[in-house]
């Protein structure tokens, strides 16, 4: 009996010390650089946001944040890298509508997109819009629809992989307008933007913040915003509802996730660092210039992000699967 009690006491002491060590580890976190994976090639919409966040979060965390671009398979390769990482807060992902939601609807992935990641914070929300090369014959959306109807399958549209927001948006546009064009698939937004500017592809349903500078520089034209209201960053561009192609509103969101099992204290510290970065006046100005909406503090809470993430999966997976989209 005495031996059993001593054994129980010993186990209690071990558990106490293990908890103390874990707490101490969380208190000194981070003690080395943090890797932030962008699940897309360089030049896409996540790059500017990641670098802006990284520089500002460094001040509160006391460690540099190293950006690692891993593109391919609609973001699933980069997402897999994070899913396999140690749950210690040193490997994170700046995930988005594609990588953290849409791709898992039709790719066979080695992770559960909801259960195998710990949400840290929602970071920003943008718009999708339909843009075109500068030399495209149509000057506005009405002319675009008419031209596409008169020239079926003669136009090309860039898409960031199959089943991406760009792809879903393009499919819906064809269905609602009775038009047809050919998709050209790219590994990421950066290469697609380059080909659009170069005139090698005609159209694209693109994320707004990454392509807004191209419109401002006169390198592309914009036909319509896929939203219920005009975009504050480009108010001269009508909504697609206004030009007769209503009904699809994709909020292009980006957020931070860590591998499942990352300590709660680490998640809380990262969430706080994101909040401080987004509250910085200089960061707010840049995000506004990029046309990005910043979520409220309540929307950024990890538990709120998880609920939002789950709701997005429940909303979009049936739509994506109904489109019978196959992996590249």
Image (spheres, helix red, strand yellow):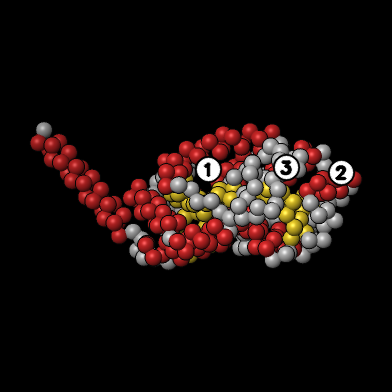
Reading the chain from its start, which is encountered first: label 3 or label 1?
1
Q: From the image, state whether disc 3 or disc 1 is nearer to you.
A: 3
- For label 3, the crowd category at 10 Å Cα-Cα, with few meaning under 14, some 14 to 19 and many 20 or more, is some
> Which residue corresponds to mark 3?
242
> Which residue corresponds to mark 1?
113
**Residue 275 as seen in the image, left or right of residue 150:** left
- For label 2, the crowd category at 10 Å Cα-Cα, with few meaning under 14, some 14 to 19 and many 20 or more, is some
> Which residue corresponds to mark 2?
149
Residue lying at 76% horizontally and 53% vertically, measured from the top left: 203
Q: Is residue 272 above or below residue 242?
A: below
Whether residue 170 is visible: yes
Q: Secondary structure at mark 2?
A: helix
Q: CA distance from mark 3 to mark 1?
A: 36 Å
- Residue 153 location (% of width, % of height): 86, 47
Q: Secondary structure at mark 1?
A: loop
Q: Is residue 67 above or below residue 264?
A: below
Reading the chain from its start, which is encountered first: label 2 or label 1?
1
Residue lying at 69% horizontally and 61% vertically, measured from the top left: 215
Nearer to the camera, 122 or 139: 139
Residue lying at 25% horizontally and 48% vertically, measured from the top left: 19
């Amino acid at each position: 009996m005495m031996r059993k009690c001593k054994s129980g006491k010993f186990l209690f002491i071990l558990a106490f010390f293990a908890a103390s060590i874990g707490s101490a580890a969380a208190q000194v976190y981070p003690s080395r650089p943090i890797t932030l994976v962008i699940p897309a090639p360089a030049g896409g919409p996540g790059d500017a946001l990641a670098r802006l966040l990284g520089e500002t979060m460094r001040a509160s965390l006391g460690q540099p944040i190293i950006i690692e671009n891993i593109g391919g398979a609609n973001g699933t390769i980069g997402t897999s890298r994070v899913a396999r990482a140690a749950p210690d807060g040193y490997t994170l992902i700046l995930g988005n509508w594609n990588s953290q939601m849409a791709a898992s609807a039709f790719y066979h992935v080695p992770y559960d997109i909801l259960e195998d990641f710990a949400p840290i914070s929602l970071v920003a929300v943008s718009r999708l819009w339909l843009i075109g090369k500068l030399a495209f014959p149509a000057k506005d959306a009405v002319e675009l629809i008419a031209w596409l109807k008169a020239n079926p399958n003669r136009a090309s549209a860039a898409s960031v992989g199959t089943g991406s927001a760009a792809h879903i948006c393009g499919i819906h546009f064809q269905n609602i307008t009775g038009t047809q064009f050919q998709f050209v698939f790219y590994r990421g937004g950066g290469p697609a933007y380059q080909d659009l500017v170069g005139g090698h592809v005609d159209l694209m349903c693109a994320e707004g913040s990454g392509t807004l500078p191209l419109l401002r520089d006169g390198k592309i034209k914009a036909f319509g915003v896929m939203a219920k209201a005009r975009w504050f960053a480009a108010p001269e561009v009508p909504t697609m509802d206004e030009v007769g192609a209503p009904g699809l509103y994709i909020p292009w969101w980006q957020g931070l996730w860590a591998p499942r099992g990352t300590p709660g204290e680490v998640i809380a510290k990262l969430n706080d660092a994101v909040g401080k970065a987004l509250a910085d006046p200089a960061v707010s100005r840049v995000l506004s210039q990029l046309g990005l909406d910043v979520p409220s503090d309540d929307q950024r809470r990890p538990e709120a992000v998880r609920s939002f993430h789950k709701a997005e999966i429940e909303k979009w997976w049936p739509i994506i699967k109904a489109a019978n989209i196959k992996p590249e």
